[in-house]
Amino acid sequence: MSDMNIKERDSLYIANTYNRFPIQITGGQGSLLYDENGKEYIDMGAGIATTTFGTSDPEWIGAVTEQMKKFGHTSNLYYTEPCVTLAEMLTSRTGMKKVFFSNSGAEANECAIKTARRYSELKYGDGRYKIITLDRGFHGRTLATLAATGQDIFHQSFLPVTEGFLYAKTNDLDDVKRLLDEGGVCAVMIEVICGEGGVIELSPEFIRGIDALAHERDVLFIIDEVQTGNGRTGELYGYMNFGVNPDIVTTAKGLAGGLPLGATLLSERVENVLTPGSHGSTFGGNPICCAAAINVLSRITNDLLAEVRAKGEYIKAVLTASEDVVSVTGMGLIVGVEFKAPTPKVVEKCRENGLLVLTAKEKVRLLPALNIPWALLERALIIMKDAAHDSI
Ligand SMILES: *Cc1c(COP(=O)(O)O)cnc(C)c1O
């Protein structure tokens, strides 16, 4: 097309919203990716927790192409089979009652926010619309989910964001209680691990405390499983590690293994809140994306989940034994690592040595495919430890 390289064309034609790593991905297989020079990388990011079974997984490609050959899109004006089958799978494995499908995490959360406001409005009338979220949380980039994201830095220059969000201190149950006592609250929304916020673990007491407080007051408990869902923590959804009963669960990222699909799962309490015309999405529940997600969910078996937990424990054991590591947080295959060396330097050295990792705040963040082979995981940790050692 032109003599310009990809980087020049990207900066000419793509809105300047991303700080990209200086490589072009041209292919991949499983947990390996290749750049424009044929250099091989171990992928510890999986498209940000999205390619659940890695890149170009043959079974996943089979499921997607089979649906593509039948039909690709119809809109929600007609009945289609893949979205119903997927909704049956999601509800039977969670005990939730109904599903609304969309295309992203932000949209899954928008649906949760609308459902919470409408539940409260129908039952209690006007004025009970506030939602408590956490000051280290992240819920998306639309104006409402940006407002739900309690980190000020995301709001700057976009004011006014959607009104009605209160921010509690992360892991401070008294602060949640204080905000609930102010009144006018219809829901509390949290991630069970604050992913973008720096892979911050919430204490089980905090999560269970919110569950109890919310339910005492008929305030809905919404859990954002966009990043922690679909097997990532070693349970199908992260909340299942804590024995709590959310009223609404949202997910996206890894659900369809690399195609865009969001889902908002509704419990018995809210299953009939949304009615025809109250919400919708043109692409939501797209048959190709749903066929992909059916394949993904059917492979998140108890055996796979046990393996995710074992891999997570292995990563933690190897890294905490290193004298160059300050802390390791997370569960299963969502891991945050604080090295003594500066994170950008570690990330760059890893890349030079054939390993792709992510960051979250001041940490290195690991979100590999759930089926990453043990041998690649071992190699990745050796490269990372060496990179951290050489970066001090
Ligand atoms: C990524 C993420 C979102 C936003 O998802 P998009 O698909 O980018 O809209 C929302 N919540 C959490 C917890 C996330 O990690």
Image (tube, rainbow, N blue to C red):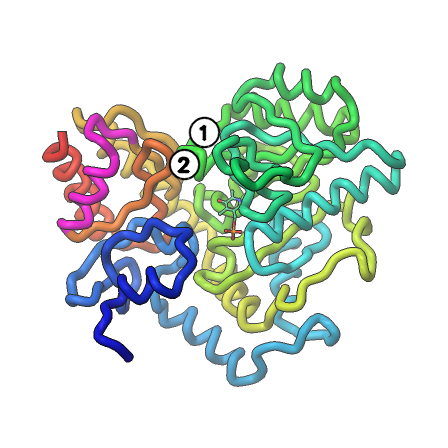
Residue at 74% from the left image edge and 18% from the top image edge: 181
| Disc sitting over residue 201 in the figure | 1
Measured as percent of width and height from the top left, residue 218 is found at 79, 30
Asked whether residue 14 is in view, the answer is: yes
User: Is 355 covered by the magenta stretch?
Assistant: no
Residue at 54% from the left image edge and 27% from the top image edge: 135
Residue 43 left/right relative to 90: left
Residue 50 left/right relative to 71: left
Residue 316 left/right relative to 196: left
Measured as percent of width and height from the top left, residue 234 is found at 44, 43
Residue 16 left/right relative to 322: right
**Residue marked by disc 2:** 331
Q: Amino acid at mark 2?
A: Met
User: Is 350 covered by the magenta stretch?
Assistant: yes
Give the magenta part as a residue range: 338-353
Asked whether residue 236 is in view, the answer is: no
Q: Earlier in the sequence, mark 1 or mark 2?
A: 1
